[in-house]
Amino acid sequence: MVPLNEVLIFAAAIAGWFINNPVWLSVQRYFMSLVLAALAVRLVLEQRRSA
């Protein structure tokens, strides 16, 4: 198992990288919004099937 402090250091490094690369931060936000929207649509469609 990965120790918590290593996860925190890795997360901080990624956050620092995104701060220095704002275009990639925008790409990441856009991508994650697409992923979350797709999951929402999938949940709605699954609920309609089971009802």
Image: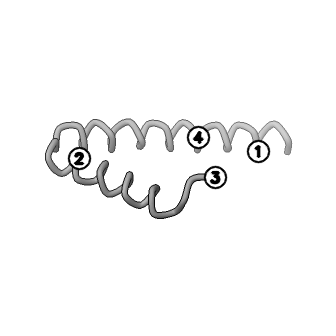
Query: Which tag, 2 or 3, sits closer to the chain's start?
Result: 3
Which of the two marks, 1 or 4, is nearer to us in this view?
Answer: 4
Query: Which tag, 1 or 4, sits closer to the chain's start?
Result: 4
Residue on which the image places disc 1: 47
Quarter of the figure with residue 49: top right
Residue on which the image places disc 3: 1
Spot occupied by residue 44 in the image (x, y as percentages of width and height): 67, 43
Q: Nearer the viewer, residue 10 or 21?
A: 10
* Residue 18 badge: 2
As measured in the structure, the alpha-carbon distance from the residue carrying label 3 to the one carrying label 1 is 36 Å
Q: Mark 2 Cα within 10 Å, few/some/many (few <14, many 20+)? A: some
| Residue at horizontal 31 percent and vertical 48 percent from the top | 14
Spot occupied by residue 45 in the image (x, y as percentages of width and height): 70, 37
Task: Work out which quarter of the rendered image holds the C terminus and state it.
Answer: top right
Placement of 3 over or under 34, stated as above or below: below
Spot occupied by residue 3 in the image (x, y as percentages of width and height): 54, 59
Task: Look at the numbered disc 2 and give the secondary structure of its residue.
Answer: helix
Asked if residue 37 lies left or right of residue 11, the reply is right
Q: Amino acid at mark 3?
A: Met
